[in-house]
Amino acid sequence: MKLNRRNTLIGLGTIVAGGGAALGTGAFSTVEAGRDVNIETDGDGAALLELRIESETLSGDEDDNDVIEFDLDNLNEDATTRFNDALAIGYNGDEDDVTYSIDIEDEDENEGQDLLDVDGEAMYFEGDEPFEVTGSDGGDEISLDVVFDLRENDESDIPEEIIITATDDSSD
């Protein structure tokens, strides 16, 4: 075959097409795709970790499953107000040999501040130790007092969001 301009162009075209076919296999290194997600929950009363406000004075919006709402209209300024056995935390699972330790923290500006048995915070929780729920036939729960201390704090110091954590201590 004589090397001329036409043969050179055909040869280069064949190389480019063949290289594209060999390298263009459809493989990729990254794909990002957005999808809608629909998640439904049973609410706190039927969940594995049950959260229940027991005080009618404090009970707020029960229609919103991810909100425990305290009605603070009845608090005195410059006073400490305690609502005994106001928050119940229970275990609704069917395992008998599990133990969960309970912790409550401030999610707001004092992020990570422990709110369980800590005197002096604008809002904190008290109860009988140990703060844990254990699997049993009838379920297990703890009752906590909710305390609002507005002597050295004001209403703006009360956390808008808290984190309630249950940690499995069964294997320890």
Image: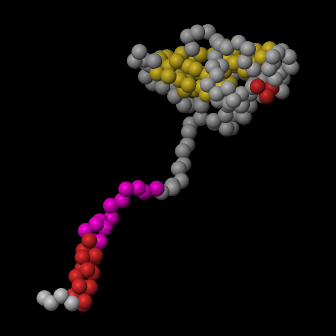
The C terminus sits in image quarter: top left
Q: Residue 111 location in percent, x, y?
A: 64, 27
How many numbered callouts?
Answer: 0
The extreme left residue here reads 1
Is 119 situated above or below 34?
Answer: above
Which residue is nearer to you in this view: 162 or 43? 162
Using the rendered view, name the quadrant where residue 156 is placed.
top right
Residue occupying image coordinates x 63% and y 35%: 66
Q: Residue 136 location in percent, x, y?
A: 47, 17
Residue occupying image coordinates x 82% and y 15%: 151
Tell me if residue 93 is in the magenta stretch: no
Q: Residue 30 location in percent, x, y?
A: 41, 55
Q: Is the magenta stretch mostly helix, strand or loop?
A: loop
Which residue is nearer to you in this view: 37 or 155? 155
Residue occupying image coordinates x 26% and y 71%: 19
Report whether residue 151 is seen. yes
Using the rendered view, name the quadrant where residue 73 is placed.
top right
Apparent side of residue 148 relative to residue 138 in the rendered image (left or right): right
Is 146 situated above or below 42?
Answer: above
Apparent side of residue 68 relative to residue 35 in the rendered image (left or right): right
Tell me if residue 26 is in the magenta stretch: yes
Q: What range of the chain is rendered magenta?
A: 20-32
The N terminus sits in image quarter: bottom left
Report whether residue 85 is seen. no
Looking at the picture, the colour scheme in use is: secondary structure
Is 96 situated above or below 111?
Answer: above
Residue occupying image coordinates x 71% and y 31%: 160
Is 171 situated above or below 45?
Answer: above
Which residue is nearer to you in this view: 26 or 44? 26
The extreme right residue here reads 77
Q: Residue 37 location in percent, x, y?
A: 53, 50
Apparent side of residue 129 relative to residue 95 in the rendered image (left or right): right
